Image (cartoon, rainbow, N blue to C red):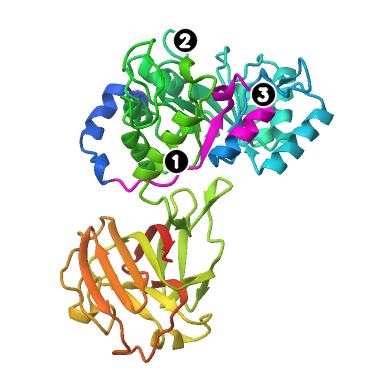
Amino acid sequence: MRKNIIVFMAFLLVISVLYCAKGQVELIEKRTLESVKGAMASTDYKEVRIKKFPVAIQCWTFRMFTFYETLEKAKELGIKYLQPYPGQALSRDLKGVRFDHNLSDDLLKQIREKLREYGISLVSYGVVGFENTEESMQKVFDFARKMRIRTIVTEPKFEDASLLEKMVKKYNINVAIHNHPSPSKYFHPETVLEYVKGLDERIGACADTGHWMRSGINPVEALRLLKGRIIDVHLKDLDVFGSKEARDVPFGQGKANVHDILAELTLQNFHGYLAIEHENPKDVDNPSPPIRKGIEYIKSITYYQDYEEILKWSWGRYAKHGWNHYGPGYFELDGKTGVLKGQGGMGLLWYSRKKYKDFILDFEYKCADKFTNSGVFIRVPEVPTSDDYIYHSFEVQVYDNGKDIHMTAAVYDAEPPTIGAFKEPGEWNHMKITFKGNRIRVELNGKLALDWEAEPRGKVRDFAQEGYIGLQNHDSRSPIFFRNIFVKELR
């Protein structure tokens, strides 16, 4: 009897633990706009180095024009990506024909030819509605596949998303839930977050910043709430916050705080498109001028505007395309975050696609501890096939425990830094290396650490006027981490 009581009590204990754990998980998973404000208070958006996002046009912007005329307008603006919507007139020559997913294959072929002619791609489609049936959804998804569209923007009327998720998995096409202003179904980001919870990660949010503003919702807070589930962005700036009568204005001239919006998207490592949707009625006959002003503003606040990211995001993940490894050891790459982790060594991961002459190399790195030892090689003259490259190229050192010509920000074995500006192990550092002519400048965490007219010195016997860029993996005991690797060529 006593044994049975003990077993029963143990059973009750297990049940109570599981119940509490379930409650804790639900508590952790429950995010609200209020819950993100605390984390945002410690975020200094002014310090964020804003990435360059691809810009698209939501064709509703040119709703007074045909789709083919919109291609011309986009080309004039230098925009290569479009988000068409169902219902826009296709062409002046085709009376009554509207762009949508019901067009014949012959017309779709004609559209593809026009797109090639203008050098423009369709990247998303919407806002489009469909019923919760396989036939209705399949028509839209088939159309998207034919047109190589990666994202369908919609506002589902149904609660059961199982069939929608099935289509996403079958076609490998994203679905972005769009928000119109209050009282529409998805006006609040918490509603969208609840809808996509537990679903395939390819089902997420289409973040319409203007409609959030009209609903009295801070777009930066909404973006933070939806972190990890933002697939598409309708970027807008409005003259008034919290009013349904608010009108679109060029980016930077309204109340949206576009700088912080792009900074938040940068922090989230967003890889989608910024779809410009300018809806101001007074601009409807000629929306290009305010759009052009807005694009110039975006460029002015984009830190990496003229840079190329050389550890690239491709087809939903980071990949080491264009990178080769010489020597022992290797770099692990987290395909989701783009973080490289050095293992073993000593070896060199070098970017093989291009030799660089005068350039700025901009990246972040992190040390596992103070004994982490690594470096960045610049102007490696030839394809590394032996250790001989170390005698013909410079290494900017990463070694916090080193001294003088062997410490972080030194040109290894040649020139010491003037300051030690590195952060504590475990924190990300920002390093900027400029090599122009024979002059090397190293900026570490915003401080000039080295400015040197390079010459053969120490182990370096000579150096080239152009060469490859390489990252050193030293050992596994105290690994180095790299991310956000950008290059800007200097003319």
Horizontally, residue 285 falls left or right of residue 7, namely: right
N-terminal of the two: label 3 or label 1? 3
Residue drawn at point x = 44 percent, y = 84 percent: 389
Q: Nearer the viewer, mark 3 or mark 2?
A: 3
The quadrant holding residue 294 is top left
Q: Which mark is residue 184?
A: 2
N-terminal of the two: label 1 or label 2? 2
Mark 1 lies on a secondary structure that is loop
Q: Nearer the viewer, mark 3 or mark 1?
A: 3
Residue drawn at point x = 50 percent, y = 42 percent: 54
Q: Is residue 65 magenta?
A: yes
Magenta segment: 48-73
Horizontally, residue 122 falls left or right of residue 291, namely: right
Marks 3 and 2, how far apart at CA: 28 Å
Type of amino acid at the residue the image marks with label 3: Thr
In this rendered view, identify the residue nearer to me: 356 or 380: 356
Residue drawn at point x = 38 percent, y = 31 percent: 251
Q: Which residue is mark 3?
A: 66
Q: Which residue is mark 1?
A: 270
Horizontally, residue 151 falls left or right of residue 420, namely: right
For residue 148, above or below residue 443: above
Type of amino acid at the residue the image marks with label 1: Phe
Mark 2 lies on a secondary structure that is loop
Horizontally, residue 243 falls left or right of residue 161, namely: left
N-terminal of the two: label 3 or label 2? 3
The quadrant holding residue 255 is top left
Marks 3 and 1, how far apart at CA: 31 Å
